[in-house]
Amino acid sequence: MNIPYTVEERPDTGLANGKLGIWLFLASEVMLFGALFSTYIILRVGSPEWPHGELNVWLGAINTVILISSSVTMVMAWASLKMNDWGKHRLYLIATFVLAGVFLVNKYFEYADHLGKGEGPWHSTFLAIYFTLTGLHGLHIVGGMVVMAYFIGPGAKLWRKNPEQFANRIEYTGLYWHFVDLVWIFLFPVLYLL
Amino acid sequence: MDNIGIHPGGEHAHVHTDAHGEHHEDLGFWRKYVFSFDHKVIGIQYAVTGLLFLLFGFTLMMVMRWQLAYPGKPIPLIGQWLGQDRAPMGIMLPEFYNQLGAMHGTIMVFLGVVPLAVGGFGNFVMPLQIGAPDMAFPKLNMMSYWVYFCGGVTMLASFFQRGGAAQSGWTSYPPLAVISPGQTMWLIGMIFLITSSLLGSVNFIVTIVQLRAKGLSYMRLPFFVWAQFVTSFLLLLAFPPLEAAGILQLMDRVAGTSFFMPSGLVVSGKPMLIAGDGNPLLWQHLFWFLAHPEVYVLILPAMGIVSEILANNTRKPLWGYKALVYSVVFLGFMSFIVWAHHMFMTGMGTTMSAFFQTTTMIISIPSVVILTALLLSLWGASIRFTTPMLFALAFLPMFGIGGLTGLPLGLAPSDIHLHDTYYVIGHFHYVVAPGTIFALFAGVYYWFPKATGRKMNELMGKIHFWGSFICINGVFMPMFIQGLGGMNRRMYDGGAQYVHNAGLLKYNIAIGFAAWGLGLFQIPFIVNFFSSIKWGALVDRNPWEATTLEWSAPSPPGHGNFLTEPIVYRGPYEYSVPGAARDFTPQFEPEKA
Amino acid sequence: MTHMDIEKTRNTIKMYIAIGVALLVFTAITVGVNQVHLAVPAAITVALIIASIKGSMVASVFMHLSHERRWIYGALLLTAFFFLVLMSVPLLTQMDHIGTPTGVANPSHAEPARH
């Protein structure tokens, strides 16, 4: 049984099902992270003092650069498919995956630094929201990496069977990935700088 | 669009349709009935699971009502089996009463009503009503059900952990919820349920936007589909903050954080050793940001179901279709900005309080428009008093009472006296119980023939209806009197410890008997439901002579639903069209040449 | 996103790289401004403005929101509105405190009322 508009666009909406689906999912994610940002605002306003300088700004900045670069490689991975360049696509997709991994490695060092000093989320409200926001964001990075690994590995077969559908799926993965980058663009100044 | 020329499931009784023609390999038992991608199978899974949870949640309440009617007396029949930490010598402990209360609410709302109304009816009926072969993302649909199932199992399992199930209300307010037993599993269960909901809502919206049949413009959609559409947006955007809040409360419990734990908290005489600086009201904001739209999730599908049944059994178009559509969309939007009317007593200033009172009063307008449109639909009607119609008709005044009694709660000056009293319990139960649940019963009787190819028994249906209608009013009407008299909610002795409640305690006994009577009257329904699957009267495609698309598919529909591509020629409620040969002109019937 | 031909794709790729570089520049600006140690309200405003500029670039170019369809725009606009409500309203309920003893900036740290 064939579900219509899985690959081709429905004329009156101009959308394929997956495109609308991923955007709706991202809308819900905006509300999810929104609740955590709202939490940050309330807790910070209600707090007599808010710590500064507890986080490594340079590591955070490097991670920002890494994530932005991974966003560029991700969109290039999709554009390469549109140009029919399978080799470049693989290169860019794997690069995105690697950059994501480096981000996580940096995060690991950051966490280990705090936890080693016994400063976990229980230590202060600031660290509590820091660990929760970056932790949830980190889980989203892991999720993205799982999807990328699938498209690097077993999922790549779809390119031969149905190239348009494969390109669409890479596009949707990209949309998700850019969203993860977008969240970090706000997380970094809010947690590390302000 | 594809021509679904597949061998139909047959017009005979099988709850789970398995129409495989020569073109499809046989899927085997597990893929056909358990891990199916077919929206009809998934819909039935949701519906049956939801109904079972409704029954279980109701049973919890029947036990609670014993304690309230006869405080301190051993619970008959089951008291001896509950164990020392729940009911030593059969007498309910306060902790167990609180567990029953918290879990009754949680189970009814999140495991019963919404899965049945949205997961069950939405999944089964909506794709058929829009002429789609299935949902946009069938595999995601299957996942939604199983994640819900895991959430349900987690919630049930919580009864068996040390300390018992959650016992801080379905609202789970900190600091109490953070320090009480049972909450961790509740929170994990909620995270499963919310995830299931989110996956489902994406599926619903994409399906309605993308998979409507040819000729089915938005303003030709059955109102049921509009209701499900708005409901899905509510679920999509309102649930995530509660998911976040659930994670935060989970961290407060297991990671020692203080998101919601204020400084200087003293528990049982001992100061709590926490970082502090948390804000208990933050939980309330995040919780009610979902939970208010959630109550519209509870009512909107019900309004949709009632609309379909009214149109069909009055043999007239619904009055004010456009008004209904604009109202339901406006209602959905407003539902996001009224939430703090649940928090009038938390010390917010008069400006914000005025804001929320205003938005709450405004939101009552579309509700009234919808109810009025449905009532006006009865004027000049040729009413067929079938069982679904009886339930649908009863919905109208019951929802009216529920809605009207909400008004004093939405205004802060009166809410001061009524907040956290039995008046509130009476108000919201009128909307959900003789409101939504009656609509859901109506839907079961109405669409049972489409799902199974057989009709349910009318006599048992009428006994179910009248018994339930009388008893349910007996349960909830006295609560308004109790609440106005000042009786607080969530008191395990039924309020006996307060002198001002003395004259109100007698109602607890009457309410108890009404509740147990209500329980007895569900037996005809349960018997009817299962026996009709085997022995109900056989029907063809359109036993109710209805106009919407689902009645053009076989009963039950096969895999892929329609034998030929559905095309829509007109609006959804063309009943009694002047000059037509019959008193109904289905959407899918071509114009005469 | 409709199908693009090779030439357009090449131009779009140039745009992607350009935006990528711009994002890195803005990141440097963010960190640089932070070294200036502005007063808190100003610091928050500047940081949010820069982050919003970066975010809009990611959204409009990388996520091609600038030529997306009405349904997507509509859903996102709705979400943005509710997001703003979620950011501001809970805070407003905690800041509007008529009746609290004077001299207390935040009710959650108010002295218990003296009778």
Image (cartoon, helix red, strand yellow):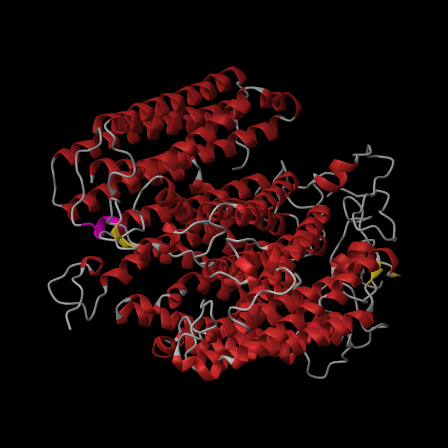
The picture places residue B422, in percent across and down from the top left corner, at 47, 74
The picture places residue B500, in percent across and down from the top left corner, at 40, 82
For the C terminus of chain A, the image quarter is top left
Q: Horizontal placement of B141 versus A116: left or right? A: right
Q: Horizontal placement of C8 versus A130: left or right? A: right
Q: Is residue B289 above or below residue B372?
A: above
The picture places residue B391, in percent across and down from the top left corner, at 69, 72
The picture places residue B583, in percent across and down from the top left corner, at 81, 73
- Inspect the magenta stretch and tell me whether residue A46 lies in it: yes
For the N terminus of chain A, the image quarter is top right
- In this orientation, which residue lies closer to the viewer: C111 or A86? C111
Q: Which residue lies furthest to the front in this view?
A: B89
- In this orientation, which residue lies closer to the viewer: C51 or B38? B38
Q: Which residue is drawn at 67% across and 76% down?
A: B469
Q: Residue at x 46, y 63 (%)?
A: B335
Q: Residue at x 58, y 61 (%)?
A: B60
Q: In this view, does A24 lie above or below B322?
A: above
**Residue B415 found in image quarter:** bottom left
Q: Give the range drawn in magenta.
A: A43-47
- In this orientation, which residue lies closer to the viewer: B168 or C110? B168
